[in-house]
Every structure is written in structure tokens, then in C-alpha cells.
Amino acid sequence: MSFHIVFFISIVAGFVGAMSGMGGGVILIPVLTLFGMDIKHAIAVSIVSVIATSSGSASAYVRDRITNLKVGMFLEMFTIVGALAGAAITLVSGRRILFILFGIVLLSSWVALFRQRKEGWRQATHQDVFSRWLELEGSYYDRSVRQTIAYQGVRSYLGGPFMFGAGLIAGLLGIGAGALKVLIHDLVMGLPPKVSTTTSNLIIGVTALAGTSVYLAAGMIDPGLTAPIILGVVSGAFVGTHVLVRLTNQTVRHIFLGVLLVLGIEMLFRGIWGV
Amino acid sequence: MQVSTNHPDKAQRNYSFDMESLVGYILLTGVLLSVVLLMVGFVWRWVRVGNLQFEHSIVGMNFFEFILSSLRQIASQAFRPRLFLNMGIAVLMLTPFVRVLASVFYFAFAEHNWKYTLFTGFVLAVLTYSLFLR
């Protein structure tokens, strides 16, 4: 594939990923395969770009002191092992299975985004012994309400194993799987939404590195292809977050939902009826 | 929900020299450096050859051998666009790795928090092992 096509696709993927908060991989991989790239290669090069986008945005959130480093570093232990296993599975698995799994992930993200829970966050009332031992509490200054919000993480004994699953999907499909991580932070561990998203960003970088190491060892990281993708996704994400000061427009959301749905169905069909 | 109306600076004073800035700046520096290296590689290639196609792969090397081979080329001053591309990717991959390494040291020597030294140490060990894979 020529530089221009890869670079252009990556810019769009980074841009859409940043605006929707879904990350670039979910768009990048299906589109690359549409242009004829082998799905395993698309997964391998995409996961490298995930390191770039997540580290880039994590750096800002960490310095704003919203990210909970201890929660992140505890859960990383599980995601990296999951990512190693996931990437190893991808190397030996059939391509059609990967298409089907990718389709399922796209469609379930579509459902999750479509239903978007509007309930407010509620502080967990009782912290279990294990989570207290892990020192999983914190506070951050919320600019929008001008208050310091204190919180306690709970049920980390469930959060850990669930995170292994999130890491597995990340390594397997070459995506950040941020939406899944946020869901675990939110529903299982009772973290406030802002802490969930920013902490998941921190974890994604290390998880993607673990996945990348497997693909690198398999000789699947081709610099001539990986480099334009990194540059494209990073610049697309930069434009998406900084220049257009967040279009929280309904139209954007609808377009994104439409794209997710079409790509999800397309991947599923290609998996079922052969590529 | 526990809410207090402390000014943010007050809440932040609890952190001494903070891990937050350390981690934040490591990530920022790594990503920026990587992007700059990749751009230098592409611009140089374009100026010299007039196209942006690179056809080379990293085969039969683990990550540390990949870094070593890049360093050897730097030492022998064999600068080529391809080297910048490789370095850009290497720096990007080192970024989370260095972040974890710094966290281990921070938890051990600044916070004396052995629990988290152990946790981050485990992450570091697994990553090091996986980067040695071939």
C-alpha cells in the first residue's frame, strides 16, 4: 500500500477516534483490510500506533492529576499478561475468526455507545478490605463543578481478572479496548467517570506495548508501514482533540454510530462468508 | 459523594515531588521525540529519493537487538532515513517501558511503598521478558 493511502486513512482514524473517544484502532483496522491489507498485519501495525495515541493523551491527564496511578499500575499487571496471550492467539488463529471477533467488538461498542448510560456516578459506600490494602482511593479537582471529589475504588479482586480479559481483546485485535476498560472501572470498581477514562488511557499504553512485543518478535512490524500510521493517527488525534474544540454535536455522534455499524456488519460478513 | 471545596493547590500539596509530573513528562517526551524522528526520516527520504516508500522489515530480531543495531548504526555514523524510522519506532516502544521503570524506582526510593514496588516490578519483568522474545 502506498504511503499516501495509509497516511490518509490513519489521519481519519485518529481524528474520528479522538472525537468519539474510542481510539483509532477500531476504525483503522477494518478500513486497512478494506484496502486489501492482511488483517493480521493490520492488527500488528495498529497496536503500535495505540502506544502513541494513549501515551500522548495520558501525559496530559496524568499531569492534571485526574489519573489514579495506583489503580492503573495494579490493573496493568493483568492487562499485559492478557495482551501477551491475546497476541499469541492472533498469530496462530484463522483470519476468518479474527474478522468475526472484530465484527462482534464493533457491534457491541455500537450498542454501548447507542445506549450511553446517563446515570450520574455514585460514591461507593463501603470499601472492601482488599481494595483498602491496595490503597485504591484518591481525589481530583473537577473543573466543571469546581470541587475536589474524593472517591474509593472497590471490588478490585474482580477488576483485576476482568482486566485480563480486556487486555486479551486488546492484544488479540490490536485495539486499545478503552471502552471495555472504562466500563470495568465504572461498573466494577466504582471510579468516577473522569478517573475511569484517564486511568484507562494510562493502562492502554503499556498493554499495547506488550502486544507489540509479540508482533515484533513474529517479524510483523514493518517500519515503512508502521511509521506513516503512527504519524497519521497522532496528527489526526491532535486535530481531533485540540484544534476542533470538541464538537459535542449530535450529528458527529450519529455519523460515528453509522460508521461503527457499517464496519461491524461488514467485518462480520467477511468473517462468515470468507474474505 | 464526599465533596470538599478545597482549592486544587491545597489538594495537590500532599504530593511531594510528584510521580504525576515524572510520568507525564516521560510520556510526553517519548511521543514527541518519536514523532520528530519519524518525520525527519520521511522528509529526508523525500528530499533524497523523491518518494516515501520504505521497504524493509525487522525480522529475526527482538526489541533489544533492534535497538542495539540502531545504536551501532548511529555509532558508525551510518545515518540513513531508514535509521530514523527505526529509531522513531524504538523510542515509541521504549516510552511506556521507561515509564514503568521510573515508577519502580519512584515507589521504591521516593515513597518506600514496597507493595507497589513489587507490582510495578512485576510489570517491568513481564515487559522485559516479552521484549526479549524472538
Image (spheres, grey):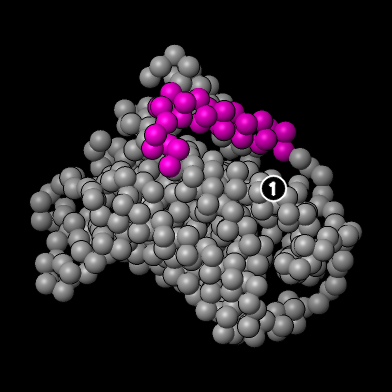
Q: Amino acid at mark 1?
A: Ile
Left or right: residue A129 versus residue A163 is right
Above or below, A184 against B103 in this view is above
Looking at the image, can residue A249 be seen?
yes
Residue A101 within the magenta-colored segment of the rendering: yes
Left or right: residue B64 versus residue A243 is left
Q: Residue at x 79, y 67 (%)?
A: A132
Q: Main secondary structure of the magenta part?
A: helix
Above or below, A218 against A194 in this view is above
Magenta stretch?
A88-116
Circle 1 sits in a helix, a strand or a loop, which is it?
helix
Quadrant of the image containing the N terminus of chain A: top left
A261 or A19: which is nearer to us?
Answer: A261
Badge 1: chain ID:
A
Above or below, A94 against A130 in this view is above
Quadrant of the image containing the C terminus of chain A: top left
Looking at the image, can residue B31 be seen?
no
Q: Residue at x 20, y 61 (%)?
A: B83
What residue would you read off at disc 1? A184
Q: Residue at x 20, y 64 (%)?
A: B69
